[in-house]
Amino acid sequence: MTTFDEREKGFESKYKHDQDIQFKVHSRRNKLVGLWAAEKLGLSGAAADSYAKDVVASDFEHPGDEDLVGKILKDFQEKGVKSSAAEIRKELEHKLPIAKQQVMQAG
C-alpha cells in the first residue's frame, strides 16, 4: 500500500468518524429540545422521555429541521401552549452546544 493510499484511508476514516459525531450531536440536540417541549406540554418522567423520542424520530422524515419544528408546533397548538416556530428554532440553537458537550464527554 502506498503512502497515498494510506493517507486516503485516513481521510475516509476521519470523515466517517466526523459524520458519526455530527449525527450523534444532532440527535442529542433533538432529544434535549424534545424534553424541553415535553416540559412545556406538562409531561414528565417516562411520558417526557417517550415524547422526546417521538421528536427525534420526527426529524428523520425530511432533511432539515422543519419537520421537527412542525411537530412540536402542532403539539403545542393542540395543547394550547403559546409558542412560535421562531422560539422552537431558538431552542434548537441553544441546545446544540449543550448536545455537543454531552456527546464529547460521553466519548
Image (spheres, grey):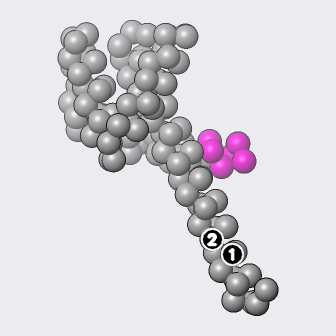
Look at the numbered discs 1 and 2 and tell me whether their residues touch, using CB distance below 8 Å: yes
As drawn, which residue projects farthest toward the front? Answer: 1
Residue 43 screen position, x and y as percent: 43, 10
**Nearest the camera: 5 or 104?**
5
Crowd rating for badge 2 (residues with CA inside 10 Å; few <14, some 14–19, many 20+): few
Q: Residue at x 20, y 30 (%)?
A: 84
Task: Check disc 2 and report the residue beneath it.
Answer: 12
Q: CA distance from mark 1 to mark 2?
A: 5 Å
Asked which secondary structure carries label 2, the reply is: helix
The percent position of residue 30, horizontal first and vertical second, equals 45, 35
Residue range (magenta): 102-107
Q: In the rendering, at what x and y percent does residue 41 appear?
A: 35, 13
Please give left or right for residue 22 compared with residue 104 in the image: left
Seen in the picture, residue 43 relative to 23 is either above or below; the reply is above
Magenta stretch: helix, strand or loop mostly: helix
State the residue at coordinates (23%, 38%). Answer: 86
Residue assigned mark 1: 9
The image quarter in which residue 82 lies: top left
Q: Which residue type does callout 2 highlight? A: Glu
Q: What residue is drawn where x is 45% and y is 32%?
A: 56
Residue 65 percent location from the top left of the image: 32, 42
